[in-house]
Image (spheres, coloured by chain):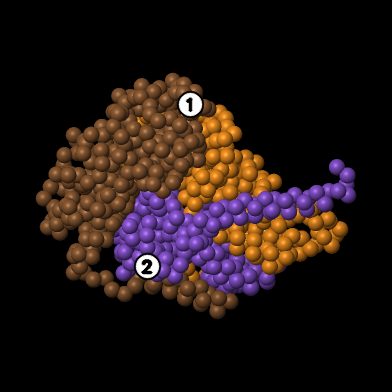
Amino acid sequence: MSARKTVIAAFSLALTFAGLGVSHTQEEVRIVVTGSSTIAPLMMDIAQRYEAAHPGVQVDVQTGGSSRGLSDVRRKLADIGMVSRALGADENDVAATRIAWDGVALIVHAQNPLERLSDDQVRAIYTGQATRWEAFGSWDGPITVVSKAEGRSTLGIFLDYLDLDIRDIRAHTIIGDNEQAVKVVAGNPRAVGYISIGAAEYHASAMTPIRAIALGAVAPTSANVANGSYPVRRELNLVTYPDPAAPVEAFLRFASGQQVHDLISDHYFSPASD
Amino acid sequence: MHRNLRPFVNDLVVRAAVAAVVLVLAAIVMHVVTRGAALVSWDFLTTAPRAAGRAGGIAPVLVSTAAVTGVALAAALPLAVGAAVFLVEAVGPHTVAARLTRGCLGVLAAVPSIVFGLAGNMIFCDWLGFGFSILAGGLTLALMILPIAACVAETTLRMHGEDRRAGYALGLPQRRIVWSIMLPAAAPGIFAGLGLGFGRAVAESAALIFTSGYVVRMPDSVFDSGRTLAVHILDLAMNVPGGDGNAFATATVLLASVAAVVALFTALDGKQGRDFV
Amino acid sequence: MTSSQTIISRPPRIRLFRGPLALKDAVFVVVLWASGVLAIGAMAGVLIVLAIGSAPALTEAGLGAFVADGDWYPTAGEYGLVAMVAATLAVSAGALAVAGPLGILCAVYIRYYAGDVAGAAFRVVLMTLAAIPSVVYGLWGMTVLVPHIAAWQPPGTSLLAGVIVLSIMVLPTVAVLAEAGLRQLPASLYLGSLALGCARHAAIKRIVLSSAKGAVAAACMLGLARALGETMAVLMVVGNAVAMPDSPFASVRTLPANIALEMAYAIDVHRSALFVSGLFLMAMVGLLLVLRRCWGGADAPQS
């Protein structure tokens, strides 16, 4: 019996000490970046590149959403917040640095032959006036309407573009992240949703059975998002308190500069050209 | 129903239920393994993630997972056993203190993980000043494991009333009875509870996003932020276009390592269990 | 949450002989009480965090706005949670109705049907499944289950999908905990029944399960708690439209899913309203525990 206890105690201790580890160097500079789950994977890559170029600096990237980014900056838990929308009027206590643009496109299943939908048709679908694909010609069956959760900026600019109120929307499936929308639409030939154009471009190239449809008349490509001709887009921002510490400012310059544009494109966003 | 058929039908029901469960579970495991196994290699286990996890491996993620789980189990074991012994030995079963404690544990069991995340973020990261760290994540998980582990430990302890009374009849002090009679007798149940708690800890993502965090660097200490396997899978599957392949590969690694650890638990446990059957 | 009723009739409470308390014993008593207080403190901590978070919404909109039979448009000042409370109960009750009996049958199988090796192996499988992240169950539900339901009864993301995925997730918890309970029964109970001429199924149904009903009920209760609090997997398959659960094929939203879905991008009162969802969930669980206690001794076995 006591042998068993010893084994278990040793096991727990070993695990703990494996965690406690060896050294905790103090002279390193640590920059904490938290916020939008849309920006976090990109920021993780930028941080890895920055750390490689600047030994002694650690950039910790955390996710959890735009609102967490703002609240962590305000609570001084983070140096930089990632916010995947424009700042509101009551948020001018922090300063924003725009790093990229992200457009929004409709997606349908690849089997759906529809080439485009007018704004009125999209409005009819999302307000529940049109409930079957027959209304638009060559596709049939009941429409499954996929929309985003309240508070997401993609929803906000989608509503703004169509001039709709959140209370007008009649959705069957409400999702959070882009990839969830992709998986729902890919699994249901009669679904329609809207996602980030970059994600749509990736999935088109990866043979995922979805297809992007433009909102408006301009083709939904990240090039058109970058040059501003595609109308439905949002900005991806980094926010800090005004006059950040020198290492934070250096990192901000790096993250909004030319040297990370390839990473931004790798993540299917469009670099903000200043 | 004819009387003679009844045992046959009853046995059939049990076996059919087990078969159905095994089939469904096998389908899910196959779904993961067929998509992930081909991508698992020595390199995958020993290198760091690149391109937001779409390329590269999961080495730092494995280490962080072991550390977070270790902290969680090390903290949950004494907490859970302590709470259970408190309920059995320190207070009567129907006293206010007992009901309050049991009620609190019951409610705690149903708190959604994201609420644990927000609470852990506020308590451990902010108020106690641990920041986003493996320590904060592990302690948050310990609170999540606590109800399940304490409940099982209490149930098990209560089933050894006779041993307990025998101890008292011999005039042993309470401390000796608990330490030398009740805890050894209840060990299998405590381990079953801890095993489930281990599962819950390894599977957790929402609570950890807010506490131990998202960083994929190799952690130096428990005060570093570190991403666990479940968080990695969640991010790759839901947030990174093109992350599905490595998400399934990571899930395959997670399944294999959990099966290994649980088998170890069972082996430790098996010897003990036999004494009582 | 667990029973005090066991087959062993409860002895009068044994009091410690109150001689001069040795230091070690005193320390022991202090540690015991500290453990109890810590358990309560953990719950209090969570409650305090939720209360702090909820305060702005509760002061601005008032509790009435949340229980009123209204819609949920928190950015437009509508905070009705009733439909989500109903959906949470429906999904969890459905999951327990499936996973409870199946889990108990699995526990019985391990204990009384399988040989040593098969039983241990099945247990390892169950415990491994308890450790699969909910996102993996969710992915399976989303990419395999939901499309099948969608082809039959669109939109596919539905209460039914939630119940199925959640049953699978809760089952290992119920089975492993119930098995741990069965294992604690004295072997003489089962063997004695057989020796007296009981058939195996009768011994299990009438003797074993009724003796272990406390542990079995506790297992089901923890399974239910797990179901009530489950977030990610449910969020991925139930559709999340805020509506009363009036059909198994309808899209519904549970309280935990509500929090996870909107918390990341919510600000101000909206964010605070999500904390209120958390409070509601905890109040629901508390109420369930009280109801269970009031309901005739509370330890009715589940099958």
The x, y position of residue B267, in whole percent, is 60, 71
Residue C16 visible within the image: no
- Name the residue beneath numbered marker 1: A138
The x, y position of residue C146, in whole percent, is 54, 40
| Chain identifier, purple in the render | B
Can you tell which of label 1 and label 2 is closer to the viewer? 1
Q: Secondary structure at mark 2?
A: loop
- Estimate how packed mark 1 is, as few (under 14), some (14 to 19) or many (20 or more) residues with alpha carbons within 10 Å: few
Q: Residue at coordinates 40% horizontally, 64% vertically from top-left?
A: B58
Q: Quadrant of the N terminus of chain A?
A: bottom right
- Estimate how packed mark 2 is, as few (under 14), some (14 to 19) or many (20 or more) residues with alpha carbons within 10 Å: some
Left-right relation of A103 to C297: left
Q: CA distance from mark 1 to mark 2?
A: 50 Å
Type of amino acid at the residue the image marks with label 2: Thr
The circle on residue B47 is 2
- Look at the picture and state if C149 lies above or below B145: above
Residue A253 visible within the image: yes
Q: Chain of mark 2?
A: B
- Whether discs 1 and 2 lie on one chain: the answer is no
Left-right relation of C76 to B250: left
Q: How many numbered circles are shown?
A: 2
Type of amino acid at the residue the image marks with label 1: Ser
| Chain identifier, orange in the render | C
| Chain identifier, brown in the render | A
Tell me the quarter of the picture where residue C266 sits: top left
- Look at the picture and state if C16 lies above or below A257: below
Farthest residue toward the bottom? A3
